[in-house]
Image: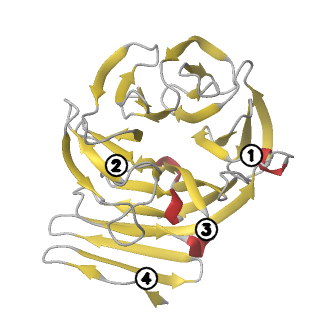
Amino acid sequence: MCCVKLKHCSCIIVYGIRDSPNNTVFQLSFATDSIEYRVEPLETFKTLASQGQKNLGVCGVAVLEKELFVISDEQPDVEVYDMSTFKHSRNIRLPGVTDPGDIVACEKNKRIYIVDWTRRTFDNKLMRLDINGIEDRPQLSLPDDECRLFVTRDSNVLVTFYRRRRVVEYTPDWDMVFQTIIKDEIIYPIHSVKLSNGLLAVCHGTSNEATHRVCIINNDGSLQKSFGERRGAGFGKFNFPTYLAVDRSDNILVADRDNGRVLVLNSSFTVTTELLTKKEKLRRPRVLLLDEANSRLVVADCNEDIRDGQVFIFNVK
């Protein structure tokens, strides 16, 4: 067992212990709240697309009906893996797709959503498929070059528009539920999730930005609060936070890509701690998925060139 650096203040204590070589426990304690994440490595594998001549990177993962769906850059196929054996079972061909950018799945309506970045032509396409990969709805045109997705608790699809600096929620039939235009504090929102109170958590910070943060956004697009500051690697800093996941208690998991780690940010936005780091052989975690129904955490990882995609799967207790 080894102890991780203790951080505390008057009402918050954060600590981590490694109680076995393959098991890390993080305990976040608050005056009114307490959560615990226990992660155990379960499986790691390289995707088929990464083993080809182009050595492609993974850009999206989704879980539905005990299957893992994986998409890779500039690859018009979805690789499907059995979540019991972690063996590749089949591919789903995406006719006409040139540059898939993200994938999510809805357990309630048994549908998969994929956005095609169309080689950054500012005309993304959102598609809906059944579990067999059959499109059952006309594609929705999204006027942006890098949209990313999230499925809400209401089974709607949340779309983050990178260039247009807005977040739009759609029903499964593409009816708009709401639109939030991000104010000037956030230059380019990369990914967003919807919290239980209806507000948005948004991550931002690219190589052209000095400030890298995770923020809570009000319905009018204004900044309510944030965590993070100037780009960096220390406590309270991010370096290209690319993707978010949220649990039932509104604690947020952050893929801190260029720091090679996954962080947990508590629901009060008062403390963060490292959940996974380079010690778990992460290089650049690009996308993550918290599958609470099956107590799994899926992390898509790549190398410094955003290639050589591999998938890490952890048990979460």
Amino acid at the residue labelled 1: Leu
Q: Along the polypeptide, which appears first: circle 2 or circle 3? A: 3
Query: Please, what secondary structure does the residue beneath circle 3 have?
Result: strand
On residue 17, the disc is 4
* Count of numbered circles in the view: 4
| Closer to us: 233 or 308 | 233
| Closer to us: 26 or 65 | 26
Numbered disc in front, either 1 or 2 = 1
User: Where's residue 199, x and y in %?
Assistant: 24, 38
On residue 56, the disc is 1
The quadrant in which residue 270 appears is bottom left
Amino acid at the residue labelled 2: Arg
Q: Which residue is mark 2?
A: 248
Amino acid at the residue labelled 3: Pro
Give the answer, above or below, for where 158 lies relative to 305: above
Amino acid at the residue labelled 4: Ile
Give the answer, above or below, for where 247 lies relative to 275: above
How would you rate the neighbour count of disc 2 (Cα within 10 Å): few for under 14, some for 14-19, many for 20 or more? few
Q: Along the polypeptide, which appears first: circle 3 or circle 1? A: 3
The answer to whether the residues at label 1 and label 2 have Cβ atoms under 8 Å apart is no
By what rule are the colours in the image chosen?
secondary structure
